């Protein structure tokens, strides 16, 4: 899994409807104005971690809500669990693992 194509939250940016609809500028390739960063971007920056899945508090209450918002967010949750070693197999198998 190449983290450069995966948002801090775990969403696959290349398939993200928010990025495609210009609701999100893409966290890895954008410079966010101070105080206006996406919550996962801000939190990962403060904790100096590359993504939410590597946080000792994963999934925190804020991200639990986020991961329940849409199918792409649920897939992001499974991807982060795979990264943590909580889901066995390859990344495609992780997509089909229940949240």
Image (cartoon, rainbow, N blue to C red):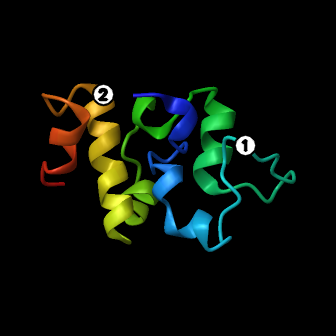
Residue 27: give x, y in percent of width and height.
Answer: 66, 48
In the rendered image of this protein, does residue 45 appear above or below residue 42? above
**Would you say the residues marked 2 and 1 are in contact, meaning their CB atoms lie under 8 Å apart?**
no
Foreground mark, 2 or 1?
1
Residue 7: give x, y in percent of width and height.
Answer: 54, 45
Residue 22: give x, y in percent of width and height.
Answer: 68, 70
The number of callouts visible is 2
| Residue at numbered disc 1 | 29
Name the quadrant containing residue 28.
top right
Image point 81% across, 51% down: which residue? 32
Quarter of the image where the N terminus is located: top left
| Residue at numbered disc 2 | 84
The secondary element bearing badge 1 is classed as: loop
Name the quadrant containing residue 98.
bottom left
Quarter of the image where the C terminus is located: bottom left
Question: In this view of the protein, can residue 60 be seen by the observer?
Answer: yes
Dot 1, crowdedness within 10 Å: few (<14), some or many (≥20)?
Answer: few
Left or right relative to 98: residue 59? right
Image point 50% across, 61% down: which residue? 16
The secondary element bearing badge 2 is classed as: helix
| Nearer to me, 50 or 4 | 4
Image point 25% across, 35% down: which residue? 91
Residue 93: give x, y in percent of width and height.
Answer: 15, 40
| Nearer to me, 70 or 58 | 70
Left or right relative to 38: residue 33? right
In the rendered image of this protein, does residue 55 appear above or below residue 7? above
| Nearer to me, 90 or 86 | 90
């Amino acid at each position: 899994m190449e983290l450069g194509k995966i948002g801090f939250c775990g969403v696959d940016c290349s398939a993200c409807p928010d990025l495609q609809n210009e609701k999100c500028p893409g966290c890895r390739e954008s410079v966010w104005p101070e105080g206006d960063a996406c919550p996962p971007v801000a939190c990962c920056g403060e904790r100096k971690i590359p993504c939410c899945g590597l946080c000792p508090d994963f999934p925190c209450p804020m991200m639990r809500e986020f991961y329940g918002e849409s199918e792409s967010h649920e897939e992001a949750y499974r991807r982060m669990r795979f990264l943590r070693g909580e889901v066995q197999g390859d990344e495609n198998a992780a997509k089909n693992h229940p949240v």
